[in-house]
Amino acid sequence: MGVHTRYTDGLCKRVTVAPETLVRVCAAMGAPIARPGDAAEALRAQHCSADSAFDRFLPEDLRAVSGQYWTPLRVATRAAEWLDDVNVRHVVDIGSGAGKFCVAAALVSRAYFTGLEKRSSLVASARALADLFGVHGRVQFVHGAFGVTPPPVADAYYLYNPFGNYWFDSIRDTEGDAEFGTAPRVREIAFVEQFIRTAPVGTWLLTYNGFGGQMPECCDLIRVDWTLSAALRLWRKQRASEPPDLAHQSRAFRRASRMRKSRRRDVT
Ligand SMILES: C[S@@+](CC[C@H](N)C(=O)[O-])C[C@H]1O[C@@H](n2cnc3c(N)ncnc32)[C@H](O)[C@@H]1O
């Protein structure tokens, strides 16, 4: 039993997935299934990118926006490979929406996932998705707004454009617990940067397309995949963060010394 995942560098890794899970995944993705082995083959061969097949299990209004709002399966699969590679055990998806990232990544990795989402109806829908795919033992969703509700402690945090204004053309748009506009967005981005600065050294960050802000200097970029619809990046907090004013001063100092050097070059 197992699934080979292939990296762009040609290496393969074997991921163990229970047959029942494979049956569910392939059933969900419309793959013909006779035995768990067929299911494994189907998943490995082509169905990782069958977004429309996966999205059939979302409520209609959430399915309609999947291409713009939710992580594509190829991205979730790549993220899952990286997370397993670096032995991440618990990932928090900040702004988990319909739960697609958490559920899809849980299906192809060993990690535990917690989604934090500010819209309660999306939390309910995401829980239903995790049940449907049989991953509720490793995936949970918490209702709360990042910046107000402290995110659970984890060794990795996933961020996919969390702070845009998301509209569903449905009853969800009138949900009382979501705040929109530029001011909350600016505040939330600042919260992320501050959250990373105070996170323990060793914390992993995964960004798909980005979160709207700058990754603090205490983090290094470890991997990037440019082959996806937007860049997927794996970062690691490698050192304690300088207090913001010192960080600002040291950046200014480096800038000034670069300018001095280039002026000296111009003179000689
Ligand atoms: C681009 S979607 C990403 C969904 C999910 N991460 C995925 O990739 O499938 C961003 C989600 O973040 C949620 N969101 C926005 N601001 C938030 C906040 N401050 N706290 C929690 N969730 C938030 C939105 O409601 C939306 O569902």
Image (cartoon, rainbow, N blue to C red):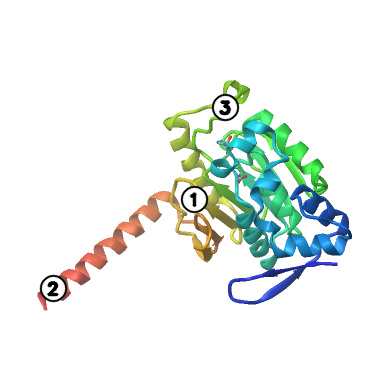
Query: Which label's residue is closer to the chain start, 1 or 2?
Result: 1
What's the distance in space between the residues labelled 3 and 1, CA to CA? 21 Å
Q: Label 1's element?
A: loop
On screen, residue 266 versus residue 36, left or right, reads left
Query: Which label's residue is closer to the chain start, 3 or 1?
Result: 3
Q: Residue at x 47, y 32 (%)?
A: 184
Which image quadrant: the N terminus?
bottom right
Q: How many marks?
A: 3
Quarter of the rendering containing residue 147: top right
Which of 90/9 is in front?
9
Q: Residue at x 78, y 53 (%)?
A: 26
Q: Give the amino acid type for the residue marked by disc 3 in the picture.
A: Ala
The residue carrying mark 2 is: 266
The residue carrying mark 3 is: 178
Query: Is label 3's Cβ within 8 Å of ligand 1?
Result: yes
Q: Measuring from the top left, give residue 11's x and y in whole percent.
A: 65, 77
Q: Label 2's element?
A: helix
Q: Measuring from the top left, give residue 16's x and y in whole percent.
A: 81, 65
What's the distance in space between the residues labelled 2 and 3, CA to CA? 54 Å
Q: Give the amino acid type for the residue marked by disc 2 in the picture.
A: Asp
Which image quadrant: the C terminus?
bottom left
